[in-house]
Image (spheres, helix red, strand yellow):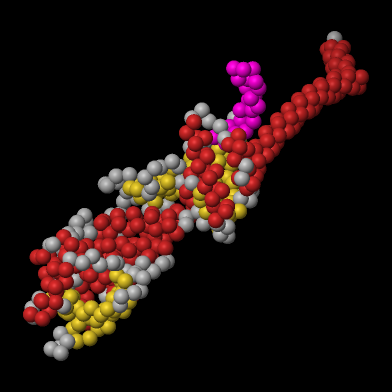
Amino acid sequence: MGVELDWNIESERGRQTHKQDDPEERRAGWRALRRLIFGVLLLVGIASVIVYLVSKRSEQIDQAVEKQLRDTVSAEIAALRIGDQAAFLALQRSAAPEWLIAQQTVYNQYQSQIQTTDLRLTGTIAQTPVIQKQRARVQVEEIQNGTPYLRTWFYWRYDDEVDVSGKTIPGGWRHVPPDYTFWGDAKEITTEQVTLRYSEVDAPFAQALSAALTEWLKLSCAALTCSGLPHITVTIAPGIPNGVAWENRSEWSLIVPSPYAERARSDQPLDEQKQIDIGTLLANRLVDQALNGRQMVFPSDAVYLRSAVVSWLVGQYVHKDAESYLIDSLAQKYGVDKVGKLLQLVQPESDISVLNALLGTTPDQAGLDWRDFLVWRLATEGSLIQQRAEAQWQKLVDLRMDMDRNAAYVRYNAIQVTSARKVSSVTASAAPDGTPVLVALVTATDGSNAEQIIFRLVNNVWVRVG
């Protein structure tokens, strides 16, 4: 029985193995799998076609909407070019009547500039219009005297409407007031010393300003003491009415209006005037930091020294002659670090003799360019004469000899209002007694009425003679 049982078991195993390897069943299984795969692929294919068709239709709709917008912009520019006021105003729309009044003024300004200047309205849309549902933002190019500019315009896509009389008012894109909530995604540039926040529209301006601030701080810190300088935050935003400003007196938070809210240069987003405006604020704050908050008192020379350093810094920023000759000659002859050391020495009522302590030599031996300082002295004297501030005026003139005193008081009593003047040249010389003098060639700012004015060194301070 043991042999028979083993045989039965082996026979059953054979039958089971034969059943599992049945070719017909195997082929049926594969056919079912293929049908399943084919069905899935068919469904995926149908879904893909549907998605493609929907996407294609959506794309066609988007292209049609964008084309309508471009056509509207072109029509608006064409109306400005040919002077069709009715056509131009028909493309403006707003619930606020002030908008149409403002656009009437814009139209008149364009017509005046087209007639009197080399203004070309190219109609070129600088970048792909940004469309978000019913609203759109477009940057339009115009060229004036060879310089390219961008204007940022906003549009709203209206539906057809029926007025109270039953008349259909056609819809479409219309030029509407600025929408500064539609200024693009928030962005940020952070460096070691500055964090600059802006929106997408202002990206070119923000990048240029970030690079400029990095350079300006490097230049400033080479001259001034920047230890302990706080991190600076700059926010660029459209629609700021008061121009570039610090948010408050204590924080280093600078608010800068977006240039694209008005007409902005496309080739130079950070143009020279904006550099001067922003640079002047920065230089003033850095100089006050170096002065540790000390306030200079008019009419002391300290007022001149502070403003001269500010002007010199701004000139360094924009690579332009700021006519800050004394500070520039100090930096070139003795090193830029002397500018910061000068500010450390200056007190609210310091006179120009503070240079003695800085340089270890008298003003006449320092080899400095005194032109802008003498302009300051002449302007200050004129101001004190107008104010009848005799005691303060006396500090600016040499009254030791009768002849010089009499001549000075003739001028003081005349109370004449003098026009702005400049010092064309300064020649160092000496009086018969050996006292150092400066002979300044002074003219009006238009170059007329030239005269020579002499300044004498008295107690290491330059004072006017006669």
Image position of 13 (left or right of 260): right
Residue at 57% x, 54% y is: 115
> Height in image: 1 above or below 108?
above
Viewer-side residue, 281 vs 166: 166
Q: Is residue 401 above or below residue 102?
A: below
| Residue 433 visible here | yes
Task: Let me know if residue 361 is in the magenta part.
Answer: no
Instruction: Decide whether residue 165 is among the magenta residues.
Output: yes
Q: Is residue 356 visible?
A: no
Indicate left or right for 82 with 197 as reference: right
Residue 75 lies, in percent from the top left, at: 65, 41
Q: Nearer the viewer, residue 352 or 407?
A: 407
* Residue 453 coordinates in the image, percent (x, y): 23, 78
Quadrant of residue 294 within the rendered picture: bottom left
Q: Give the vertical position of 8 relative to 250 (above or below).
A: above
Nearer to us in this view, 74 or 58: 74
Residue 397 spot, x, y in % from top left: 14, 73
* Residue at image point 43% right, 57% down: 273
Residues rendered magenta in the picture: 155-176
Tag count in the figure?
0
Q: Is residue 116 above or below residue 2?
A: below
Q: Position of residue 20 (x, y in %)?
A: 85, 19
Q: Quadrant of the C terminus?
A: bottom left
Q: Left or right: where does residue 51 sit relative to residue 444? A: right
Seen as rendered, the residue at the extreme right is 24
Seen at 70% across and 36% down, the residue is 63
